[in-house]
Amino acid sequence: MGDDKYFTIQIKGTAYRWRPIPSDDLAKIIVVMNMGASSQKSLKALMKVLAKSAGPEQWDAITDRYIDGEIELAEYTNDVLRKILKRQDKDAPATDDAE
Amino acid sequence: MPNEFAVFARRPVLITVAGTSLSLPYRPAAVWTVGVGHIASLASELADPDGRDLLADLVMDHPQGVDNLREESLRILAEATGRKWWEAARLIATAASPEILGRLVLAGVDPWGRSVGEWVAATYALCVKGADEKARLRFEFSLSLPPSGFEDEWDDDGDDAAATLDAVQAMMGTK
């Protein structure tokens, strides 16, 4: 995968560009989700990986929407991860939304 | 140095992940059986909630965290059962099959009351009970085959070509 590759996935009406998740980060997320850690800990791990994928600017914008009560992070982070992984498996960019 | 009494032990297990040591409380065989479903993170299944959260942090924050957790999970499974980890995992999976589990329970072997070492030993004993030498060797052989990527660990007990030939001939019924 090239450095310029990204997937476009919407969160509640706004499109964001997500970079592919590196295999090391993916392995970490899968382990943490399988290890029965607390839901907050799993969410924190997921957010850490997605923040890298979205980049600081977009992640700040997403965080602002969460602070404003516009989106629910637990719901959307899981959905975005699932869609990124689906795209990575296919290795083909496409658009979709997370609603 | 292997401890032959580890299979009876009901004491905490010490692991080290990303340079951090963590004591896992004693857990009965039933908990290990659940953990073997995600064998690469088995150790976290044995940890208490705070320990799990600590392990999650170590996995996320350290590049070697995932590998360390997997290595330690496999190590403690081998030490607690006195077998190669894949032999123990296969016997634990076998014990969860309805027929074998039923026989173990009818024999009074309770997975919540036994250590994983005792549970694995009981499962092995049940599987070879009444088997002739050939059937027993076949079972041993299928149990001992290492999974892909762990072939190098198969020969740890020595390289005795004559003994290997004897065993294969006995298994094939040619001796």
Image: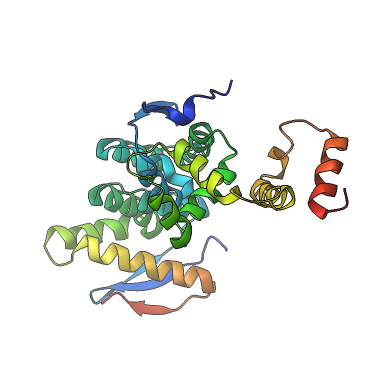
Asked whether B60 or A51 is in front, the reply is: B60
Residue extending furthest toward the front: B130
Residue A41: x and y in percent read 27, 47
Q: Residue at x 72, y 40 (%)?
A: B152
Residue at the outermost top position: B1
Q: Nearer the viewer, residue A25 or A14?
A: A25
Residue A99 sits above or below residue A72 on the image: below
Who is closer to the viewer here, B77 or B18? Answer: B77
State the residue in front, B57 or A69.
Answer: B57
Residue A89 image point, x, y percent: 52, 70
Q: Position of residue A2 (x, y in %)?
A: 57, 63
Picture layout, residue A49 above or below residue B69: below
Lateral position of residue B168 relative to residue B94, left or right: right
Picture mark count: 0
Residue drawn at (44%, 37%), measured in percent from left and top? B62
The image quadrant where one finds the C terminus of chain A is: bottom left
Name the image colouring. Answer: rainbow
Q: Residue at x 72, y 47 (%)?
A: B133
**Dividing the image into 4 quarters, which one contains the N terminus of chain A?**
bottom right
Left or right, B40 with respect to B145, comes to left
Question: At 44% across and 39% down in the image, what residue appears?
Answer: B116
Q: As drawn, is A87 to the left or to the right of B51?
A: right
In the image, residue A70 sits, relative to residue B5, either above or below, namely: below
Horizontal and vertical percent position of residue A95: 40, 79
Q: Quadrant of residue B125?
A: top right
